[in-house]
Image (cartoon, grey):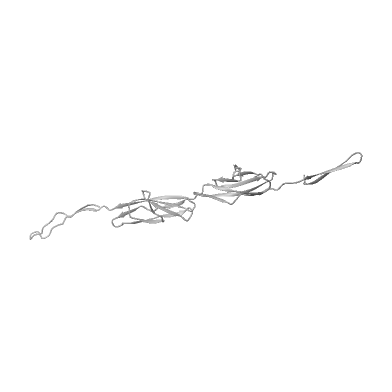
């Protein structure tokens, strides 16, 4: 059970002898396994390559990737995964010696919280309104996209000023590629009142004052 040179001496009944030797070597070198750097899944990155490096040992190798629940998920040196967890690669050389290494795959799919603000109204006095949004959570920095009901982009900042009635939708995308949206309605009240100052009147020597009796409606 040990490596070395073993010599057999054989002596006959007549006292004559002969010998021969055999060499027993030992190959118990395990492979060196590096499962690769930790990876992260996001809303943009839905799968990652686990790119292992195997050196030493005795080739050819056999590979077995298992996940956190010890299920086999691959039998090649490199695999693609789409779920977070700890992945362990077991590599066995032709000499039966083996080695393992693990890599952690995390996931960041946190959404930003978006509030486009309260509904606003345009009037003859108020000809423009500020859409003042509030954004929190998710992963900064954010990118912003305001669109109107025709799906036309009208702004790329957190807050914008508008002068037309419409429904405005703000979509916020975090650094992890995850997006969330909220809408605000801008109405317009520019209806004018209907005014009738009444009939023409005449002052005379007898009629020294008249009542101007106006009628107002609408608006």
Name which residue lies at 56% across and 50% down: 39
Q: Quadrant of residue 6 in the image?
A: top right
Q: Nearer the viewer, residue 158 or 24?
A: 24
Q: Position of residue 136 (x, y in %)?
A: 45, 54
Q: In which quarter of the image is the N terminus?
A: top right
Name which residue lies at 62% across and 46% down: 89
Q: Where is residue 119 in the image (x, y as percent from the top left)?
A: 36, 52
Does residue 32 show up? no
Horizontal arrangement in the rendering, residue 105 relative to residue 134 (left or right): right
Does residue 80 show up? yes
Q: Which of 25 and 85 is in front in this view?
A: 25
Q: Position of residue 209 (x, y in %)?
A: 12, 59
Q: Where is residue 176 in the image (x, y as percent from the top left)?
A: 49, 52
Q: Which of 151 and 119 is in front in this view?
A: 151
Q: Quadrant of residue 91 in the image?
A: top right
Q: From this viewpoint, which residue is outermost toward the right?
A: 14
Horizontal arrangement in the rendering, residue 124 relative to residue 95 (left or right): left
């Amino acid at each position: 059970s040990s490596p070395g040179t073993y010599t057999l001496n054989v002596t006959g009944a007549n006292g004559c002898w002969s010998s021969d030797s055999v060499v027993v070597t030992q190959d118990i070198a395990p492979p060196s396994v590096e499962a690769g750097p930790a990876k992260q899944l996001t809303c943009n990155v839905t799968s990652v390559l686990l790119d292992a490096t195997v050196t030493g040992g005795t080739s050819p190798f056999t590979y077995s990737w298992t996940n956190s629940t010890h299920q086999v998920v691959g039998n090649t040196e490199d695999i693609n995964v789409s779920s977070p967890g700890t992945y362990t690669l077991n590599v066995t050389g032709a000499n039966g010696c083996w080695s393992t290494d693990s890599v952690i795959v995390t996931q960041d799919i946190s959404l930003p919280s978006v509030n486009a603000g309260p509904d606003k109204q345009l009037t003859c006095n108020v000809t423009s309104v500020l859409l003042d949004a509030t954004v929190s959570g998710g992963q900064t920095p954010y990118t912003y996209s305001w669109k109107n009901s025709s799906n036309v982009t009208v702004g790329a900042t957190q807050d914008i000023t508008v002068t037309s009635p419409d429904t405005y939708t703000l979509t916020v995308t975090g650094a992890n590629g995850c997006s969330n949206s909220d809408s605000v309605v801008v109405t317009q009240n520019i209806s004018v009142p209907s005014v009738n100052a009444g009939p023409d009147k005449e002052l005379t020597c007898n009629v020294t004052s008249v009542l101007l009796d106006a009628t107002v409606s609408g608006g």
